[in-house]
């Protein structure tokens, strides 16, 4: 079972590239971030035509997340990260896909830091930890994935010095991420690539793609029950180089049935 994550950076703007990727790689589950559309603008029919069922949590012009499932209706859908009823940003959606619980997130960027945006990021990380603890109590295969906007280690970025002041690399943000792992979740990409050097994002500026100046912020975290089924994980890097591509590449994990 292949479960993938793709920060699409505008689902309508990148729809041809997205459908192309789905047709060529055919993941069982595809989780999208930054769909950047209100609920009524989501292009559901484009996915229905190729056999995917979709659920989504949209927001006009910003954020937004969606889960696509190949030939299966997502069940028990939760929209919005629990813990703050006043949080109106569309950054979390979770659902059952067969026997696997899938939670898709777009964690706040946090820049500029310090400031209210970084404080929101840290608060969101704390709420995420609480929700993941609740999911873990079910003791079933669970995958929490998406754009975490955290560079965990220096070997997850082309130049630590270049990103040293960015919210993505601040000790408090990294600490929030490491607390998730210490709770028993497995970072699939890091487990299979312990030396790092795997990028998932290349900025549009300064020739970052052409110079391979990237970093890893898209993560796939597995509960112990899912980690026991881990077969492979990787990045569909070539899709970042296609015409009108997102600035992220898709990431994926393969679980044994």
Image (cartoon, rainbow, N blue to C red):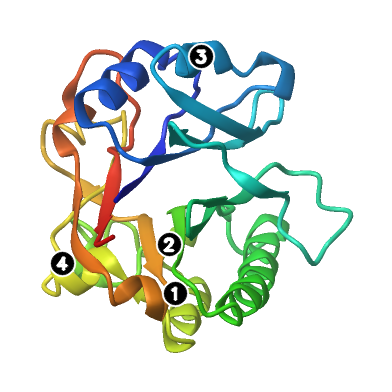
Q: What residue does disc 4 label?
A: 196
Residue under numbered circle 3: 12
Q: Estimate the spatial distance between the alpha carbons at disc 4 and disc 1, rounded to whole Å.
A: 16 Å
Q: Quadrant of residue 206?
A: top left
Numbered label attached to residue 174: 1
Secondary element type, mark 2 = loop
Callout 4: SS = loop
Tag 1 near tag 2, CB within 8 Å: yes
Mark 4 or 1, nearer chain start = 1
- Which residue is under mark 2? 150
Horizontal side of 137 relative to 179 (left or right) equals right
Residue 36 drawn above or below residue 187: above
Label 3, label 4: how many angstroms apart (C-alpha)? 33 Å
Of pointers 3 and 2, the one earlier in the residue sequence: 3
Q: Is residue 58 above or below residue 50?
A: below
Image point (53%, 34%), residue name: 34
Where disc 1 sits, the SS reads: helix
């Amino acid at each position: 079972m292949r479960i993938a994550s793709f920060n699409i950076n505008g689902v309508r703007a990148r729809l041809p590239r997205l459908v192309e990727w789905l047709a060529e790689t055919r993941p069982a589950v595809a989780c999208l971030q930054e769909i950047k559309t209100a609920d009524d603008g989501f292009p559901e029919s484009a996915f229905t035509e190729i056999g995917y069922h979709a659920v989504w949590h949209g927001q006009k012009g910003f954020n937004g997340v969606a889960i696509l499932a190949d030939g299966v209706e997502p069940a028990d859908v939760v929209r919005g990260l629990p813990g703050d009823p006043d949080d109106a940003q569309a950054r979390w959606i979770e659902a059952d896909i067969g026997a696997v619980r899938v939670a898709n997130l777009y964690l706040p960027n946090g820049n500029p830091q310090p400031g209210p945006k970084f404080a929101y990021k840290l608060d969101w990380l704390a709420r995420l930890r609480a929700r993941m603890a609740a999911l873990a109590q079910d003791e079933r295969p669970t995958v929490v994935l998406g754009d975490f906007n955290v560079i965990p280690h220096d070997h997850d970025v082309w130049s630590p010095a270049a990103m040293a002041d960015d919210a993505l690399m601040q000790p408090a943000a990294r600490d929030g991420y490491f607390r998730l792992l210490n709770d028993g979740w497995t970072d699939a990409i890091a487990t299979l690539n312990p030396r790092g050097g795997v990028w998932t994002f290349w900025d549009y500026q300064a020739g970052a793609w052409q110079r391979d100046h990237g970093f890893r912020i898209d993560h796939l975290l597995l509960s112990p029950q899912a980690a026991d089924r881990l077969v492979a994980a990787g990045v569909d890097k070539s899709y970042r180089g296609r015409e009108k591509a997102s600035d992220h590449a898709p990431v994926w994990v393969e679980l044994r049935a």
